[in-house]
């Protein structure tokens, strides 16, 4: 499956551009491709080269509101779009944590249930990480945790310390890399026909 990261056509602020780079770090197996003012239908036609594709799209609705879209294209050219509001985020540089090594991380998905929306999210994330196996040399993990209706995304690196005394066990801790994202599902549509809508005033932007 082809995995692409892109953005909305709106002029991105410096903050949004930095967030986009951080999101690219969460999905190192994806290919970043700029929109270049193309309509999304044109973008798909020109950039999607496989029968199945996952497009991860960061939308800047205005200077303070951003959304993350997971757009799944199947072999019959159906588009299933799950739109999440980014209700809170912290850029990697503001965490002053570990440096991203660029290795493919392990994946941790916890506290989700068997509802249709949760199962769809899990499948979308698994598809987004399907291009490569985890590279354990990098000792990195990306976690998605469901908590009170929100999805919390974090990226960490394992820090392993060997004891000076060989009779003692090694110690392992997590050092956060970033970014931090808090997501809330707003809509799910198939070919622009809603199958789930959290609020009534959500509009899809090209």
Image (cartoon, rainbow, N blue to C red):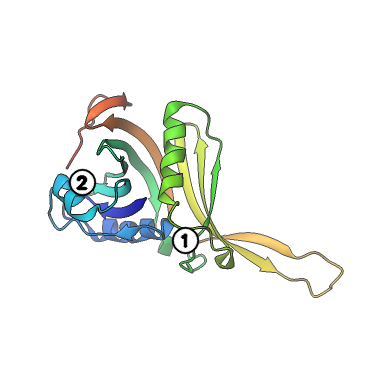
Point 47% across, 26% down: residue? 115
Q: Position of residue 62 (x, y in %)?
A: 20, 46
Point 47% across, 58% down: residue? 132
Residue 188 lies, with reference to residue 67, above or below; the image says above
Point 32% across, 41% down: residue? 72
Callout 1 touching callout 2 (CB < 8 Å): no
Answer with left or right where residue 175 lies relative to residue 101.
right
Residue that mark 1 sits on: 95
Q: State which quadrant residue 31 falls in.
A: bottom left
Say which element carries label 1. loop
Distance CA(mark 1)–CA(mark 2): 25 Å
Residue extending farthest to the right is: 167
Say which element carries label 2. loop
Instruction: Say which of 108 and 30 sits in front.
Output: 30
Q: Position of residue 133 (x, y in %)?
A: 51, 57
Q: Of the numbered discs in the image, which one, if any, rests on residue 23? A: none
The C terminus - image quarter: top left
Instruction: Say which of 86 and 197 sits in front.
Output: 197
Q: Of the numbered discs in the image, which one, if any, rests on residue 62? A: 2
Q: Position of residue 199 (x, y in %)?
A: 29, 26
Instruction: Say which of 11 and 113 sits in front.
Output: 113
Point 65% across, 60% down: residue? 173
Regarding residue 9, the answer to whether it shows in the image is: no
């Amino acid at each position: 499956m082809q995995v692409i990261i892109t953005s909305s056509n709106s002029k991105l602020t410096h903050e949004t551009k930095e967030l986009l780079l951080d999101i690219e770090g969460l999905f190192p197996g994806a290919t970043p491709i700029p929109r270049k003012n193309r309509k999304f239908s044109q973008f798909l036609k020109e950039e999607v080269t496989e029968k199945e594709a996952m497009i991860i799209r960061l939308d800047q609705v205005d200077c303070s509101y951003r959304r993350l879209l997971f757009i799944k294209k199947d072999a019959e050219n159906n588009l299933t779009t799950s739109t999440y509001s980014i209700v809170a985020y912290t850029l990697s540089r503001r965490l002053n944590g570990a440096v991203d090594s660029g290795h493919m991380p392990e994946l941790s998905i916890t506290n989700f249930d068997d509802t249709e929306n949760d199962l769809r999210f899990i499948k979308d994330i698994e598809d987004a990480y399907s291009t490569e196996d985890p590279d354990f040399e990098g000792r990195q993990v990306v976690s998605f945790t469901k908590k009170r209706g929100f999805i919390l995304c974090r990226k960490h690196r394992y820090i392993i310390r060997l004891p000076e005394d060989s009779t003692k066990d090694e110690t392992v801790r997590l050092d956060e890399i970033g970014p931090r994202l808090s997501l809330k599902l707003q809509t799910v549509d198939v070919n622009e026909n809603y199958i789930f809508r959290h609020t009534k005033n959500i509009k899809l932007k090209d």
